[in-house]
Amino acid sequence: MRVMSESVPVRCPACRREHLYTAPSYPCVCGARVAPSLDRHGSATAVTYESWEDGWVTLRCAGCGRGNQWPRPELGCPCGTLLRVPTAEGEAATAAATPSGPRGGRRSPFRPVTIHTARDAVTATAVYLRWLGYRDIRRADQRPPSGIGIAARGLVAQVDPTAYPASPRDVECLWLTAMTESANCVYFSLTGYASEARTRADALGIPLFVLDLTGTPQPVNGPADELDATGV
């Protein structure tokens, strides 16, 4: 069975231009694809201020019943307005799903999310962490000096979407944050790492990943190889 992503007409309240919006689908850890149910009778609203909390919606997988947070449906209008597309059931939108891949004790194949923006990098990281077995993924309590901090049960992760390689200080700050929260840590970078940063991460046992534009994290040191192979 294939996921049929629904399309609905969306009218921009600023310029009145009408668009046809197709809901994206995302991979659940069980191998199913989940997508939000859109409200065909609702009206899109202009986003004037975007916070982390407002940018996510809870979707429950129809295949396994898991509830996870995914990016709230949004659409950029050519007039410059960012539109928030209403979901049919608000914060608890029902997901469409299709089982795929092995079930039971084996992990299903990882299904990446293509990266176009910094937010896509965070989404791709969240998808990967769920695939590894982490739960309760959310915004980190402490904001890192650079990049975006996310957290899961027993884990602090940093996503660095900048055009500069991560520095030793970036790696050390993540490690210190994890120490204060008695958690493990992992670093994801779009650009890579300075050689000193990799040396420091190896000494501290911090997994380092590079996110390619397909949304697939590539391990770049031993701890990352082990985490990718075994999960949690």
Image (cartoon, rainbow, N blue to C red):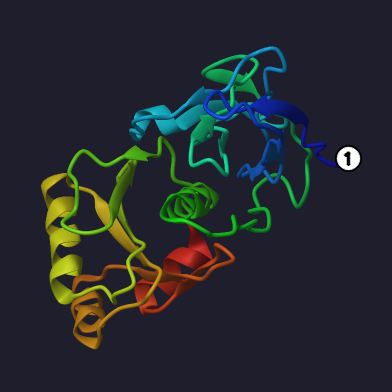
Q: Is residue 115 above or below residue 153?
A: below
Q: Residue furthest bottom?
A: 195
Residue named by callout 1: 1
Categorize mark 1 by other alpha carbons within 10 Å: few (<14), some (14-19), many (20+): few
**207 with respect to 56 (left or right):** left
Residue at horizontal 15%, vertical 57%?
A: 145
Q: Classify mark 1: helix, strand or loop.
A: loop
* Residue at figure coordinates x 63%, y 58% from the top left: 110
Residue 90 image position (x, y, % from top left):
55, 16
Q: Going 51% across and 18% down the picture, which residue do you hit?
A: 91
104 is higher (above) or lower (below) than 52:
below
Q: Is residue 164 left or right of residue 106?
A: left
In which quadrant is the N terminus drawn?
top right
| Residue 13: quadrant of the picture | top right
For badge 1, the amino acid type reads Met
- Tell me if residue 35 can be seen: yes
The residue at the point 80 percent across, 39 percent down is 3
Q: Nearer the viewer, residue 151 or 102?
A: 151
Near-viewer residue (5 or 22): 22
Residue 215, picture quadrant: bottom right
Q: Is residue 156 visible?
A: no
Residue reaching furthest right? 1
In the rendered image, residue 141, in percent from the top left (x then y), is placed at 21, 38
In the rendered view, tell whether residue 109 sits above or below residue 183.
Answer: below
Q: Is residue 63 left or right of residue 134?
A: right
The number of callouts visible is 1
The percent coordinates of residue 143 (x first, y second) are: 19, 46
In front of the other: 62 or 15: 15
Corner quadrant of residue 5? top right
